[in-house]
Amino acid sequence: MFEQVRDALVESLNLEGDAIALTSSLKEDLGIDSLAAVELSLDLETEFDVEITDEELASLVSVEDIVKLIESKK
């Protein structure tokens, strides 16, 4: 699942795959701001056929949080 999330981050936000680790902080390490987070959530919803609420989006801090959220919805 991590690889799929990493690929979605690369595609959605034009990030380098090598820079993304499971423990990467979305804001500090990857530079994802609130606007980019909304764009990412829409892409993740489409990619994984899940719904991410505003509250869930606000609680995401790391790549691992994204992986756990998507796994919990599958």
Image: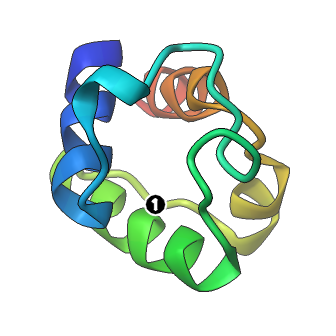
Q: Count neighbours of disc 1 (C-alpha within 10 A) and say few if under 14, some if 14 to 19, many if 20 or more.
A: some
Whether 12 is drawn above or below 72: the answer is: below
Locate residue 59 relative to residue 9 in the image: left or right: right
Q: Residue furthest bottom?
A: 35
What residue is rendered at 33% in x and 55% in y?
44
**Is 9 drawn above or below residue 62 in the view shown?**
below
Q: Residue at x 26, y 39 (%)?
A: 16
The answer to whether one can see residue 46 in this image is no
Q: Residue at x 76, y 46 (%)?
A: 28
Closest to the observer, 71 or 66: 66
**Relative to residue 15, is residue 70 depicted above or below?**
above
**SS label for mark 1:** loop
Q: Position of residue 29 (x, y in %)?
A: 65, 39
| Residue wearing tag 1 | 51
The quadrant in which the C terminus is found is top left
- Does residue 68 sit above or below 25 in this rendering? above
- Total numbered circles: 1
> 4 left or right of 24?
left
Quadrant in which residue 66 is drawn: top right
| Residue for point 69% across, 60% down | 57
Would you say residue 17 is visible in this rendering? yes
How is colour applied across the structure in the image?
A: rainbow
Q: Amino acid at mark 1?
A: Glu
Estimate the x, y position of residue 55 in percent, counting from the top left. Answer: 81, 64
Q: Classify residue 32 as left or right of residue 44.
A: right
Residue 32 pos. (x, y %): 60, 62
> Which quadrant, please, contains the N terminus?
top left
In this image, 11 relative to 13: left or right?
A: left
